[in-house]
Image (spheres, grey):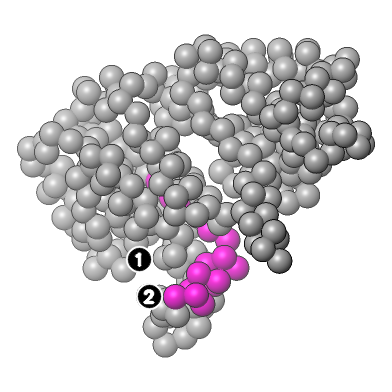
Amino acid sequence: MTKADSIFEHRVVLVTGPSGAGRSTAIHALEDLGYEVIDNLPLSLVPRLIEGESLGRPIALGLDARNRDFNATALIELIDRLHTDPRVSLSVIYLDCAEDELIRRYSQTRRRHPMAPDGTPLTGIAREVDLLAPIRARADHLIETTEMSPHDLRAEVAQWFGGTESVGLAVSLQSFSYKRGVPRGIDMVFDCRFLRNPHWVADLRALDGRDSAVVDHIATDPRFDEFITKITDLVLFLLPAQMDEGKTHLAIGFGCTGGQHRSVAVTELIATSLANAGWPVAKRHRELERRAAVMPSTAAG
């Protein structure tokens, strides 16, 4: 629990999102982190839980469309009520996932979708995503699980909610390829495509931005040092302001053409600078993770 949370009687995390997006995995991760977990508690009973004595540890509530008295308006009203309750520190996690990936997961498990028991999973997914759209817009933590394994999701939850020491705002940095689109849930995006590209150097093409030779090549761009300095200064300037606004996390993306060299190098450098300044930082390289996931099957073939 953070210093900021220690002034509240209750620390509550609401976990929701479309069925199949990883809610159970996230709930189990929070339980392993010491949270009192209650899954699918009827919304009408949540205020009673808060009115009672503190359990002495944070609470994680799993909520989805299968809740007995669930509806989006009631959940929004509950979120507003808890946010304004001086006894409560509230965080809302929304687990998001692309439609085609949700369909794939349902086809693998052969489960019926809870919102379309007599129809196709696609019908149920569309209904549920539409129902939850207002909740997604109110989420404090939007976690995109499309390309995550259960292990990845547990690590992401632990990053945000597992620390015992915190300055009140955690920072997530992610490199990505513009060819595959900007990751969901990103608060700020910086385009690194103007920097010198190691892809055009044969000896560097197979390496990535974590390799010193790649970084050295990018650093020969006359704009590189000033770019890193200005981005670092800007982010360090904004973090306290974001914290003052009550944000608990800030997600920053760095993109380049392939998501392998320039964006990775910049992400690593900025992450190091922020960590050295005392900010909790998580970093993720989306395209490198994708490549690592494909390589074993490729090698087997």
Residue at x-position 35% and y-position 29%: 163
In the image, taking residue 196 as reference, residue 291 lies left or right, namely: left
Indicate whether residue 23 is drawn in magenta.
no
Does label 2 or label 1 sit earlier along the sequence? 1
Residue that appears at 72% across and 28% down:
211
- Residue 26 at x, y percent in the picture: 37, 51
Q: Decide if residue 38 is in sight here.
A: yes
Q: In the rendered view of the protein, which quadrant contains the C terminus?
A: bottom right
Label 1: which residue?
Answer: 65
Residue that label 2 marks? 114
* Mark 2 or 1: the one toward you: 2
The residue sitting at the bottom extreme is 118
**Against 290, is 121 above or below?**
below
For the residue labelled by badge 2, is the local secondary structure a helix, a strand or a loop? loop
Which residues, given as a range, are shown in magenta? 93-109
Task: Pinpoint residue 141: horizontal percent, then vertical percent.
Answer: 45, 41
- Front residue of 12/23: it is 23
Q: Is residue 91 above or below residue 270?
A: below
Most extreme residue toward the front, as rendered?
300
Magenta-drawn stretch, dominant element (helix, strand or loop): helix
In the image, 239 versus 255, the foreground residue is 255
Looking at the image, which residue is at 50% across and 83% down? 120
Image quadrant containing the N terminus:
top left
Residue 187 at least partly seen: no
Q: Are marks 2 and 1 in contact (CB under 8 Å)?
A: yes
Indicate which disc residue 157 carries.
none
